Amino acid sequence: MQRSMRGWGSGLLGVIIFSGSLPATRIAVGGFSPLFLTSARAVIAAFLGGALLLALDQKRPDRADFVPLLIVAIGVVIGFPLLTALALQSITSAHSIVFVGLLPLATALFGVLRGGERPRPIFWLFSCLGASSVAGFALLQSGGGTLKGDACMIGAIILCGLGYAEGARLSRRLGGWQVISWALLMALPVMAVLAVATLPANFEQVSTPAWISLGYVSVFSMLIGFVFWYRGLALGGIAGVGQLQLLQPFFGLALAGVLLGEPIVPLMMAATAFTVLCVAGARRFA
């Protein structure tokens, strides 16, 4: 029980940190291209993670860990950041945040496929109801979304759920911050080349908020958040702790309203609230 509670506490800290990711990305794409933002945040986080691994003399992963770490890199280092950055060129961060409601279901599904977890059947009923609520909102919402933006967000959620489940499985043996650090280092050569190739033509035209946002998604979203998140999933269970992601829309919507002045329509709040209730029921049977 104590181990599980530590997992939930650590997972909640991760969710709070991740809540600022989409609003910060929305601000950052106003000054940087999606490709540069994705690659730059990965490069910065990779140097920080690599420094930690070196300073603390961490053992290298086994050869069998190469493919799982590659999956983590594709899912959370490359796929999710790039697809959300592309999506946020055409949709608001408030609209994109509601798609986070699909993450618990995606994470739980990959937890079964990759982590060997077996939630009870009623868990899937609640999870599917929550996912349907989010999908219904995406179809009904007008003004905040586009077909391209919504498609990118769905792809981002699928890759992120895979990266979360795979990283949590590895974290049980390697440790949470070690997993994301090794995944970042694995992606570093490609990300470094991409960052150089997509450098902004004029850095003077990049606003201060865009620079601050780049710093946030690089240090907090790409590294520190995963320290707590992977530890939480490893200790408390992928399907169970994964349901904490349903708190992320509330934190994120509040940030989008305060920082960006984006409207929070009643339909958006109703869809998010209903989804949270559904996943709260699912968590009980995880």
Image (spheres, rainbow, N blue to C red):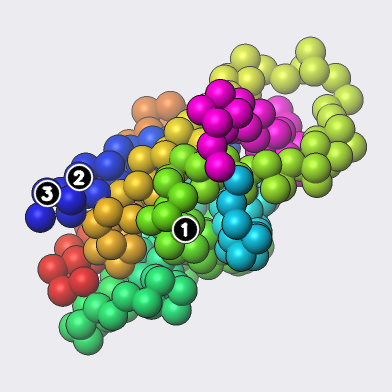
Check residue 170 in the rendering and tell me which mark sits there, or answer none. Answer: 1
Going from N to C along the chain, the mark reached first, 1 or 2, is 2
* Quadrant in the picture for the N terminus: bottom left
Frontmost residue, 164 versus 148: 164
Looking at the magenta stretch, what is its main secondary structure?
helix
In the image, 208: left or right of 242?
Answer: right
Q: Which amino acid is tagged 1?
A: Leu
Check residue 6 in the rendering and tell me which mark sits there, or answer none. Answer: 2
Q: Can you tell which quarter of the image residue 63 is in?
A: bottom right
In the image, 23: left or right of 74?
Answer: left
Q: Which residue is mark 3?
A: 2
- For disc 3, the neighbor class at 10 Å (few under 14, some 14 to 19, many from 20) is few
Instruction: Give the structural element (helix, strand or loop) at label 2.
Output: helix
Question: In the image, is residue 33 part of the stretch drawn in magenta?
Answer: yes
Frontmost residue, 271 versus 8: 8
Frontmost residue, 66 versus 100: 66
Which residue sits at x=66%, y=51%? 78
Magenta-drawn segment: 31-59
Would you place residue 21 above or below residue 243 in this image?
above
Q: Residue 168, image x and y in percent?
A: 42, 57
